[in-house]
């Protein structure tokens, strides 16, 4: 151990001696001058540039293109070439905003690629070679279809609050583009899942659309407007409608109107009319029984009414000839 400590002490003394320190300083300076000289000289290097295509109309799609990037050999001063390190290389955008024809092919020759590289590279950089020397893109015309947007959500209001109207979706329909075989299977486009709990006021938000694979959408998201307000209970008399009755007959119900209770938002309280709730009995059903009574069905209601209850859901009836 004593021998090792002695050896280390001598080595330390040697390294910190003036002669060694002077040598190291001169060596470092020489390397720096060499490095600066190398940066100032012109050199050639190969760059791999990723490609990004833009301007493709929605109704077209590239179906065959194995050119995801191009390789170029460039020449510039070493210092400038540092700007082209892999981490700093951005995609070269190829704008496809041109007239499409029935040939289904777009060709960019060597000169067109060089023109785009002028804006991409430093002014001092010269392009020696481009591989491949041209780009060939094969495209096809896609089928199109307009589909409704369906909200995928869980919405719950706070106590004593209700949804005062249907959720407004803008746009309510979207255009979809894709192979016909896939479009034939699509009937709607869903939004991403949204959860709104304890809602006590109107809310506007943006929901992304769920895009099926190999399908393009005219928009990526939709605007949602959810309307919530305090409610109160109200009751009104609504007429009973008979459907599917032969024209030579009349079905009279007793009573002709029934009492209905429901919850309604304060802003719509005075706006409710007898047309907002539709109560029906079906002639095809009543002729199947001989009791003289039939249950009423709630066929529809407007969106700003909730918890609709028919006080007496059974009426008597008689059938008369006109």
Image (spheres, rainbow, N blue to C red):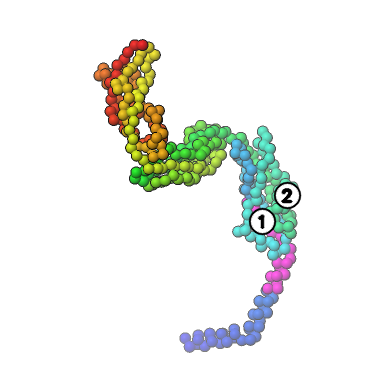
Q: Is residue 222 magenta?
A: no
Q: Which residue is label 1 attached to? A: 47
The relative height of residue 322 versus residue 175 in the rendered view (above or below) is above
Q: Which residues are magenta?
A: 32-50
Residue furthest front in the image: 270
CB under 8 Å between discs 1 and 2: no
Position of 266 with respect to 29 (left or right) is left
Q: Which mark is residue 77?
A: none
In the image, residue 237 sits, relative to residue 224, either above or below, namely above
Of helix, strand and loop, which one carries label 1?
Answer: strand
Q: Quadrant of residue 290?
A: top left
Whether residue 72 appears in this view of the structure is: no
Q: Is residue 165 visible?
A: yes
For the point 36% across and 40% down, which residue is it?
231
Sequence-first tag of 1 and 2: 1
Task: Say which residue label 2 marks.
Answer: 115
């Amino acid at each position: 151990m004593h021998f090792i400590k002695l050896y280390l002490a001598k080595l330390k003394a040697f390294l910190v001696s003036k002669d060694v320190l002077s040598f190291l300083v001169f060596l470092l300076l020489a390397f720096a001058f060499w490095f600066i000289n190398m940066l100032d000289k012109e050199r050639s290097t190969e760059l791999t540039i990723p490609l990004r295509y833009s301007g493709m109309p929605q109704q077209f799609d590239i179906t065959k293109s194995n050119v995801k990037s191009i390789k170029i050999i460039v020449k510039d001063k070493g210092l400038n070439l540092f700007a082209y390190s892999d981490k700093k290389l951005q995609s070269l955008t190829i704008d496809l905003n041109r007239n499409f024809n029935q040939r289904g092919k777009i060709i960019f020759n060597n000169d067109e690629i060089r023109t785009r590289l002028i804006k991409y590279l430093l002014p001092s950089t010269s392009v020696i070679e481009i591989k491949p020397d041209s780009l060939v893109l094969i495209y096809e015309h896609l089928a199109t279809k307009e589909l409704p947007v369906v909200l995928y959500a869980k919405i719950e209001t706070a106590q004593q609050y209700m949804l005062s109207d249907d959720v407004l979706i803008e746009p309510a329909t979207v255009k979809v583009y894709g192979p016909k075989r896939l479009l034939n299977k699509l009937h709607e486009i869903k939004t991403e899942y949204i959860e709104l709990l304890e809602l006590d006021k109107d809310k506007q938000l943006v929901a992304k659309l769920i895009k099926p694979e190999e399908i393009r959408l005219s928009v990526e998201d939709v605007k949602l407007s959810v309307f919530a307000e305090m409610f109160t209970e109200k009751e009104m008399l609504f007429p009973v409608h008979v459907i599917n009755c032969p024209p030579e007959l009349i079905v009279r119900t007793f009573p002709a109107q029934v009492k209905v209770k429901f919850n309604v938002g304060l802003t719509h309280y005075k706006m409710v009319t007898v047309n907002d709730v539709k109560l029906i009995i079906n002639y095809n059903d009543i002729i199947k029984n001989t009791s003289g009574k039939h249950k009423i069905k709630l066929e529809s209601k407007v969106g700003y009414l909730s918890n609709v209850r028919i006080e007496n859901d059974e009426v008597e009836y008689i059938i008369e000839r006109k």
